[in-house]
Structure formats: structure tokens, C-alpha cells
Image (cartoon, rainbow, N blue to C red):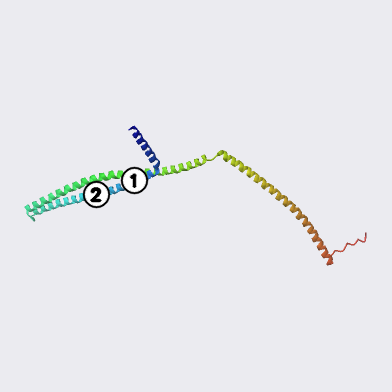
């Protein structure tokens, strides 16, 4: 018997653990808000119905009061006509009595409707208070849900970042950086060496071009002198002065 109880307890514990793993606080909160909104809609519908009954009771009470005043006025008019001789006194008394009886009935109906109105107004006030409390609770839960979603977002981002940082091999990273530094240094040295070679090549080319430019100038001067001689434009040699 004890073994069976232990097995049942183990099964219950595993079931609770599975349920806890399946529960999502955000989804549960959203469902709770949806349920409260449904309750709010039902409460507003019921509040509207009670207000409608209160309005009907108010109208009925006022209508019964008007009828009571009307019957009372009619009883007065009957007695006045009988007093003036326009109506039989006995008949007037009978009709006036009926009118007053109707007036009493209407007064009672008006009082009953007024009592209903008072009860409905109390109910409406209580329901409006409950509706406001429900609205406030929904607003509070919605704010908490927004905060919870923000916290979950930050928590997931932080967890992912920390997980990535935890998986980084610091020693391996340092070694990789050192190798990269060495490679960069080698590349920089090669670039500097090639630059010097290019500079040397450019200096030699400049010397050659300079020498060629001088020879070309000389050839050009000789060509001009030959052309002048051909044209007889060569200047005559200067004569020595007589004094000499």
C-alpha cells in the first residue's frame, strides 16, 4: 500500500513539473486579461439592463403620480358640480369616491415604482463601482503585462549574450589576435618593401629620362644651326677693330 502511494506521489510530482514547464506567464496573463474583458462586457451589458429598468421604474412612478393627481382633480370637479347643482349629489359622491379610490391605487403603484427605482439606483451604483474596479484591474494587468514582456525581452537578450560570451575561449581568442597581429606586421613589411622598390625604380627612370632630354636638346640645337647655315642665316664673324 505504501509503495502505491509513493508511486502516485511521484506521478503527481512529475505531472506538476510538466505543467510548470508548459506554463507561460505572458500567455497566462493575456488569457487572464481576456477573461476579465469578457467579464467586463457582461457587467456592462447587465449594467445597461439595470439602468433601463431604473428608467422604466422612474417613468412608471411619474405616470402613476400624474394619474393620481388627475383622479383627485376629477373628484374635486365632481363635488364642485354637485355643489353648483349641475350634477346629482349622490351620483357625484359615488363617482368622486371611485375617483379617489383610483387615485389611491395609483398612489400605491407610484410608491411601489419609486421603491423599485430606489433599489435599481442602488444596484446601478454598486455595479458601476464594480465596473470601475474591473476596468482599473484590467488596466493594471495590462501595464504589468507590458512590463513583463519588456523584462522577458531583456532577459532573453541578456541570456543569449551571456551564453555567447561564456562559449568564447579567451585563451584561443588571444592566440588568434596574436596571429593576426603577426600577419598584419608581415603584410605591412611587404607593403613597405614593395614601396621602396617602386621608389627606386622611379628614381632610375627619372635619371634616364633626364639624360635623354639633354641629348634631345643638343640634337635640336644642332638641327637649328644646320638649317640656319643652309638658309645663309649664319651670323658673320666679328671684324677686328682698326685700333688693334
In the rendered image, the residue lying farthest to the top is 2
Measured as percent of width and height from the top left, residue 189 is found at: 67, 45
Between 162 and 83, which is closer to the camera in this rendering? 162
> Which residue is depicted at the point 40% across and 41% down?
21
Q: Which residue corresponds to mark 2? A: 53
Q: Residue at x 8, y 51 (%)?
A: 94
In the rendered structure, the answer to whether residue 181 lies left or right of residue 106 reads right
Q: What residue is shown with label 1?
A: 35
> Which structural element holds mark 2?
helix
Q: Nearer the viewer, residue 87 or 158?
A: 158
Q: Are marks 2 and 1 in contact (CB under 8 Å)?
A: no
Q: Which mark is residue 52?
A: none
With 121 as the anchor, is 102 left or right in this view? left
Q: Which SS class for mark 1?
A: helix
> Which quarter of the figure has residue 132?
top left
Question: Quick one: quadrant of the N terminus?
Answer: top left
In the image, taking residue 240 as reference, residue 51 lies left or right, namely left
Query: Quarter of the image containing the C terminus?
Result: bottom right
Q: Nearer the viewer, residue 182 or 227?
A: 182
149 vs 232, left or right, is: left
Amino acid at each position: 500500500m505504501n509503495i502505491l502511494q509513493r508511486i502516485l506521489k511521484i506521478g503527481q510530482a512529475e505531472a506538476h513539473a510538466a505543467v510548470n514547464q508548459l506554463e507561460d506567464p505572458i500567455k497566462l496573463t493575456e488569457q487572464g486579461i481576456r477573461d476579465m474583458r469578457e467579464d467586463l462586457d457582461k457587467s456592462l451589458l447587465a449594467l445597461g439592463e439595470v439602468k433601463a429598468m431604473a428608467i422604466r421604474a422612474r417613468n412608471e412612478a411619474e405616470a402613476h403620480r400624474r394619474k393620481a393627481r388627475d383622479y383627485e382633480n376629477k373628484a374635486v370637479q365632481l363635488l364642485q358640480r354637485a355643489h353648483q347643482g349641475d350634477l346629482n349629489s349622490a351620483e357625484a359622491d359615488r363617482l368622486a369616491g371611485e375617483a379617489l379610490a383610483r387615485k389611491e391605487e395609483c398612489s400605491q403603484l407610484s410608491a411601489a415604482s419609486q421603491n423599485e427605482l430606489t433599489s435599481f439606483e442602488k444596484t446601478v451604483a454598486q455595479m458601476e463601482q464594480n465596473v470601475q474596479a474591473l476596468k482599473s484591474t484590467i488596466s493594471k494587468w495590462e501595464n504589468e503585462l507590458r512590463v513583463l514582456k519588456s523584462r522577458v525581452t531583456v532577459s532573453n537578450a541578456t541570456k543569449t549574450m551571456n551564453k555567447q560570451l561564456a562559449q568564447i575561449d579567451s585563451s584561443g581568442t588571444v592566440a588568434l589576435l596574436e596571429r593576426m597581429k603577426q600577419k598584419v606586421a608581415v603584410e605591412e613589411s611587404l607593403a613597405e618593401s614593395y614601396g621602396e622598390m617602386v621608389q627606386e625604380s622611379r628614381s632610375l627612370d627619372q635619371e634616364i629620362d633626364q639624360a635623354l632630354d639633354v641629348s634631345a636638346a643638343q640634337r635640336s640645337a644642332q638641327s637649328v644651326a644646320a638649317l640656319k647655315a643652309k638658309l645663309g642665316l649664319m651670323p658673320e664673324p666679328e671684324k677686328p677693330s682698326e685700333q688693334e
